[in-house]
Image: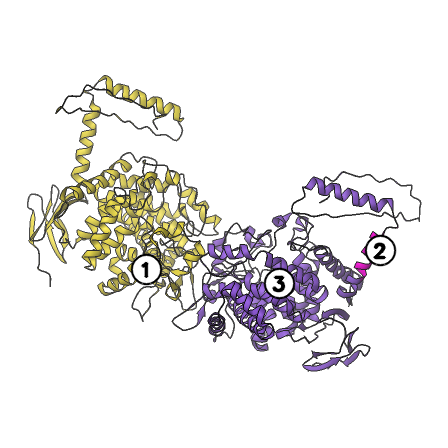
Chain colours: A yellow, B purple
Amino acid sequence: MTGDLAETVLSAGAQPGVPIRIVKYITYQTSRSVPPRDLAARCHRTLDRALEDPDSSLVEHQREHLDRFWDRADVVVADRREPVRVQQAVRWNVFQLCQASWRVEGASIPSKGLTGGAYDGHYFWDTEAYVLPFLAYTEPRIARNLLRFRHSMLAKARERAALLDLRGALFPWRTINGDEASALYQAGTAQYHINADIAYAIRRYVDVRGDTGFLADVGAEILVETARMWEDLGFYGDDEHFHLHGVTGPDEYTTVVNDNAFTNLMARLNLHYAATAVRLLEAESPDLFAALCFELSLDPTEIEAWDRAADAMFIPYDPEKGITPQDDSFLDRERWDLENTPPEKFPLLLHYHPLAIYRKQVLKQADVVMAMFLLGNEFTPDQKARNFSYYDPLTTGDSSLSASIQSIVASEIGDYRAASRYFDFALLMDLANVAGNVSDGVHIASAAGAWMALVFGFGGVRDFDGCLTIDPRLPRRFERLSFSLRFRGRQIRVTLAHDEESYAIGMGEPIDVQIRGEIHRLAAGAPLRLPVPTEA
Amino acid sequence: MTGDLAETVLSAGAQPGVPIRIVKYITYQTSRSVPPRDLAARCHRTLDRALEDPDSSLVEHQREHLDRFWDRADVVVADRREPVRVQQAVRWNVFQLCQASWRVEGASIPSKGLTGGAYDGHYFWDTEAYVLPFLAYTEPRIARNLLRFRHSMLAKARERAALLDLRGALFPWRTINGDEASALYQAGTAQYHINADIAYAIRRYVDVRGDTGFLADVGAEILVETARMWEDLGFYGDDEHFHLHGVTGPDEYTTVVNDNAFTNLMARLNLHYAATAVRLLEAESPDLFAALCFELSLDPTEIEAWDRAADAMFIPYDPEKGITPQDDSFLDRERWDLENTPPEKFPLLLHYHPLAIYRKQVLKQADVVMAMFLLGNEFTPDQKARNFSYYDPLTTGDSSLSASIQSIVASEIGDYRAASRYFDFALLMDLANVAGNVSDGVHIASAAGAWMALVFGFGGVRDFDGCLTIDPRLPRRFERLSFSLRFRGRQIRVTLAHDEESYAIGMGEPIDVQIRGEIHRLAAGAPLRLPVPTEA
């Protein structure tokens, strides 16, 4: 909060060939209680201090922090056609993530970071599903802050669940202080999957950092309350499967449906992981477990009920087409004629009545494809290819969250052209104004998506069941790609080329990593170099 | 519009045993263009005229009109337990219909008539589906006015269809001037069935009055444009059936579903009847037909397409349960536990989040039951009994439109207890404040529903395919029930008792009526008396 912005005129005596150097000082203050006027005064004082003492530690601190940030977060990519511009674009995106997450304390990361007023500073699932993976692998301390912040809103999530006549907690789809701020439930509250996105993010953070203490701290409580919501929302049908009806998945072009595949798959994970986490706590810290049970009135039969619901979870499958239907009636719908939709009619949501969109097979983002990324170990390679080729032609990409995930899964199934094209969309979302609304602010989730497309897509990094696996899929357009992963206290540096790959850790105990299907032990000071196998 | 209401104090010298007679003059002015102040002045002038000349023709006119009204509309019922109160209640309801419809000119009948401000004077499908049948059988001229008024809003209905990316016309769910005034589409615009309700009302009016000229006048145009909407909204699935997705039926406790049975059945009627009406016009008035085709760019292939879509219409059916599912996934839902829902939690819509309601099997009104009433010739008696016994226990009756239809169908399937109980709900909706909101105004549709429960339910009157049929089902609680039906220019008087029934026409040519399955010719001056067959 910097108060009113006065227009500033700079004058300088310029001489040919002599650059003029402008140093710009920016400061930032935030508070929920201090009035804006006082925050502005604080900003002025900080700036005065910096100006009065140009050798102050401020510059030094900033430099240190940025060095550390880039050491962990930089992705170096050598694009054959546009090496400079692509590298610049990658760093621009990563820098947006730096700015958006630098000072996350007692708050979350809004969809636009601090770059614009769109969405009123609210945050959605993007934070957990897109930004948190980047943070878990680069700045896990901040990932932890974010999840602790979610926990701070648990009381309101419990109220919200009660309002919907549900047990446990239901996190708001859109919020700034824990209250649901969605105007319409169908593309808002009906996205119950927010609960599972948070559970998934907890699992990922705990696994990647190895921080099981987080479960005892606040993680288990979130997992218990989110699992309770699922167990109450669902029911056992005549087919003895556990069903979730009246929900909206991440794809907002189909709303309030039955058995959305993404939601059911993610809810299954939420239920199982809640049971796993609570049992882990019981085994490792019986006292903390007893305290948790007491505080949450939790008993063993309830834990068993989560596992039972998860085991019985109905996952739609169409044997004829060999694909995962987005929901129980998606494949029965009429297909939207995307080929004959004029370009000026996109995004569809701004040009068609919701009822015109909802009744057709057309996607804002492909949530089955997203499920194949997040839960890739629950699909066969064949299913992945079939699902991708069914949903990709139905996907408008009207959501800025779409391109990066399409790129990652296209990489995985070997469709390098699609992977590369979608990567460019994510990379240039704001720099080339792909979505046409960059004036509203930066798409922080898409910036994180660009990082994910590089690391999870072309880099092939996964962490199912807490196991780090790397299956590189370097496209021909890149000569080289290198990035770092913070994993269980080690800094793993990965450099991929078409002839050779190298994997190294900076410090710490050796660690096992599965690369291209084989376990390799990485030890400090002994980089692993592997020749790249020739493609079949 | 009477302007401000001043408090009036009446003083009179009262004497024991001598009644005080108070004569109250009420006048009514309406206009879309004259300001309220001037309308109030007009009211004052009318009242002054009446007061200055107590022998004026005003009283006489009113008396004449009311005599005529009661001659056509009165229903005489002899209830064994509460003869006076039931008769009074019946007349109270019929009188509400009289007041609400007396001066319908260039307007429709709002849900509350002129008795209250709830719903802002808007009208819904109630007018066509509940009030119009009463008018068609008692004051067909007013029924015609109502339908002509709908036609006057056709241009806006065309705009509305275009806005939803549909051909033809889509009438607004809630309106006062033709613009859609629903706040939320799921229980509003998604009720596409409004189009078919209007088509059904046209068919009923034309058949009951024998006014085929109405089709040439404005009826055919409405039918063409509504049929076009259905043909465009639906699509042929892989099963070669014609499907309607993303619609809401009359039951607003389940919204935006696929293949709602009520909607599909009524759309089928709309499509078929549009084709029939246009072909009738072609045969009877080739010139008018040619003009219609020219004006609406209508060609024969389009008419064939309506019949084809109607013939292929998908009507959900569950062979295992032998019932008509409300929609394609209704039976898969979890059942709402109505038995354990506390009484203060009704109506559900005021106490539960829509998402909590929509995902369960629970009904505001049973639209499959309504379909069995409107399209009774498309269901077997067995299907009717099975459907009723499936849906009735799921029906909250939270809609004031529910009770009368449940009563009619309960009568038909021989469940006299349910028929009688539901009739009382409809009859006393406002007098006993059954819905708890009588202070918002009279439920005009429920008043019409009480008339329908008497005439269509206990009286057993139907007019499928323009054929008048009467299958009386007089319950034990009534000693006698008599009512009149205006049908093709004749006044048919029906008196039902448990030993004998009589059917008579006042004037006009003889007419054939099907009574208890047999055709009888009714002739003026020769009442038909039939003994009541003993029940098997």
Q: Residues within 10 Å of mark 1 (few under 14, many from 20)?
A: few
The answer to whether residue A440 is visible is yes
Q: Is residue B244 visible?
A: no
According to the image, label 3 marks what residue? B129
The residue under label 2 is B60
In the rendered structure, the answer to whether residue A149 lies left or right of residue B36 reads left
Horizontally, residue B220 falls left or right of residue B433, namely left
> Do callouts 1 and 3 point to residues on the same chain?
no
**Secondary structure mostly taken by the magenta-highlighted segment of the chain:** helix
The magenta segment:
B54-67
Disc 2 to disc 1, C-alpha distance:
70 Å
Q: Is residue B57 magenta?
A: yes
Where disc 1 sits, the SS reads loop
Where residue A34 sits in the image (x, y, percent)?
39, 26
Q: What is the quadrant of the C terminus of chain A in the image?
A: bottom left
Q: Secondary structure at mark 2?
A: helix
Image height of B525 relative to A73, above or below:
below
Pointer 1 residue: A339
The percent position of residue A447, horizontal first and vertical second, equals 26, 43
Determine which quarter of the picture holds residue B340: bottom right
